[in-house]
Amino acid sequence: MAGAAPLLICSHVARQFGRRRVLRDICFDGYGGEVLALLGPNGSGKTTLLGVLSTLAEPSRGHVHYPVAAGLDSPRRVIGVLGHEPQLYGELTARENLTLFAELAGLRDISTRVTQALSDARLDDRGEELVERFSRGMRQRLAFERVLLAAPRVLLLDEPFTGLDDESAQRMLARLASERDGGTLVVLATHDLLLVEPLVDRACIVKNGVLVPLDRSLALADAYRAAVSAEVERRSPDGDDTAPSRSRRSPRLPDSLGHDGDRARPTQPRPADTSIADIARAAWVLLEKDLRIEWRSREGLLTTAFFALACVLVFSFGLVHDGTPVPDAGPAVLWVTVALAGTLAMARTFERERAAGTLTAVLASAAPRPALYLGKWGALMVLMISVELVLLPLVALFFQMPLDRRPLLVVGLLIAGTAGYAAVGTLFAAMLARMRTRDVLLPLLLYPMSVPVIIGGVRGTAAALADPYVPGVVSLWLPLLVCFDAVFAILALWTFGTLMTEAAPRVAKEA
Amino acid sequence: MLTRSVPAMLVVALAMFGIAPYLIAQAPYESTMGLVQKIFYYHAPVGVVMFVATFTCGLASLAYLVRGRASSDRIAEAAAELTVVLGAIVLLTGPLWARKAWGVWWQWDARLTSTLVLWLLFSAYLLLRRFGGPGTEKLAAGVALFGMANVPFIYWSVNVWRTMHPKTTVVPSLVPAMRFPFYWCLLAFLLLFVVLLKVRVRLAEQQDALDLLLADAEG
């Protein structure tokens, strides 16, 4: 192995959740042309380790380095990640799913690649069908091809055989062997020991937060049982079990292969820095995807619009006296309804992504993180403005707002205010998506933060429709909204990438 | 470890608070509000220190996002808690003034509303830390950064919007006999803020050390 350059260097990685140390000290180098199996019982930390390797989660200590990605804008350009779930958009067809991720990876000749991938997944005749109609196994095959589309140099697979029948599993094994022979590093977490026996070059068990190499002179299942039973003996009252200690260190895994390491497969040349054009292109791809999904399901539009109408009705009970609305009730109802309906829309949008695991898939893709923010922000704005197109005339009708006075000014205020509200809301909804308490925390954080937008919107709209009209008043509010949009959009773009990486608790950084 | 400066600062702050009532009593009465105006010497300095706490939290959060040091996050957490405590004092002492000045306990004036909004924002920050689960420090740092960015909008709003609240230019216009007790109280509250911040940060350090020990014990 001497002289071979590793594709992946995992150096003293630790990861902690609260007080629980899942990973303590993981050290290994991964070389091209090998399959490394991560074994261990449920909860041992295999998925956590794959999360850290995929850059979706930050380690509490240590670091993960991809020398093969040196000079690229992101290590995600060389990584392919397949998680527990297929992470596909059910509302898109198989072809559209593959095309989306090919575009996010910035591939060329996408149509040919996608057709080939559909063929490899044995879905040639189902390419135009919505993925939500597929069986679990078909989704898994498609998800596997999605990961291979960009020809990653490092494959991180978490239980990739889930839901597959025997034939499909054997085909996947053959594909993995082919990838391995082509110089790809495959890191595989699995419980299917018999299935992967002929594929695995090196194997290790994740035990007490460290990697313990398995003896490959034995059958994989025997080596695994031996390692587990050794652990049981160590824990027995008569054994000299040592309590887990902070000084425990993972042995650096031996390189058992005789191959010559990195059998170089050319990595697609990419500039070291992400250009604005790259971000804009990826943002457009994501925006288009969201709009297509919304156009097909109309779930967000219909539920948000009817919720907005219900809000208007409820407000009318308190703000209409003797058949006449109280002064300036219209602008207040309009903007408060926009805020409430907007919260519903953004929570629903991210809930859909979270439930399908697609948010993780997009974050793990090579697409620049700011592009994800911009795409979501744009999609949310389109959705909110569509609802406002219905809401504005209705509120004007119910609350006697003289819209004919200065309609363009009101529309300008609505667009500027919606942009600011969605700018903050998109970031907060995205970063709360992983949390159990996201439903209550989103409005708690968003409403106080967007108060300048609401006040500016209400006062600006009231001033725009006032008689007599005083131009100076409106010219205070519109710049306030535009200024708010600019400040918070820039802040959100700057922080989005950092905030979307699953953080380790602060205490773990001092461990 | 707490340095000796903390008890010293606490003693000085307490001494200043002991002297403050005498200085406030010696200050001339405001012509229209009389005795009630004297709450200004507590209300306004606490408001200023609350803004100091807000910016401390925001800057520490920015440092945590950039450098990732746990010490920055501990400062941010402590400052956020102090923002909420000081904000509660401002919001409680304000109505005492408002009742005399405006005839009502609460007025939806821009400054009052803005202070309430800021208080709600940092309360939400603490709720996020409490209920967000492990690893929410970074997300909370993002919220605090956004909260700090919101403060200029709030401050600006006071001068742009029509408001019943005395503007921020009132302090330089005070007569010297009123200005001295005001700055005296401001300094006392600032000292108290520094002391509380240091003590709270120390408590967080000890909590983290305990968590580390428990993590070791639990394996």
Image: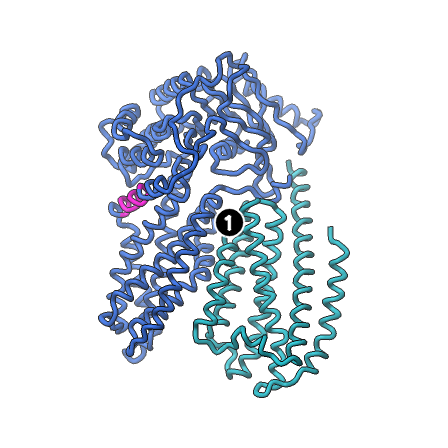
Chain colours: A blue, B cyan
Q: What's the magenta region?
A: A285-294
Q: Residue at x 66, y 42 (%)?
A: B212
* Residue at image mark 1: B139
Does residue A450 belong to the magenta stretch?
Answer: no
Q: Element at badge 1?
A: helix
The correct choice, above or below, for B79 with respect to B22 in the image is above
Predominant SS along the magenta part: helix
**Residue nearest the viewer, comparing A453 with A384:** A453
Is B92 placed left or right of A384 in the picture? right
**Residue nearest the viewer, comparing B54 with A301:** B54
The correct choice, above or below, for A87 with respect to B40 in the image is above
Q: x, y (%) of residue A158?
A: 45, 30
Does residue A293 belong to the magenta stretch?
Answer: yes
Q: Amino acid at mark 1?
A: Leu
What chain does mark 1 sit on?
Answer: B
**Which quarter of the rendered picture does the C terminus of chain A lie within?**
top right
Is A76 placed left or right of B30 in the picture? left
Q: x, y (%) of residue A357?
A: 39, 39
Task: Count neighbours of disc 1 (C-alpha within 10 A) and say few if under 14, some if 14 to 19, many if 20 or more.
Answer: many
Dividing the picture into quadrants, the one containing residue A156 is top left
Q: x, y (%) of residue A376?
A: 36, 48
**Residue nearest the viewer, comparing A316 with A27:** A27
Dividing the picture into quadrants, the one containing residue A183 is top left
* Any part of residue A292 in sight: yes
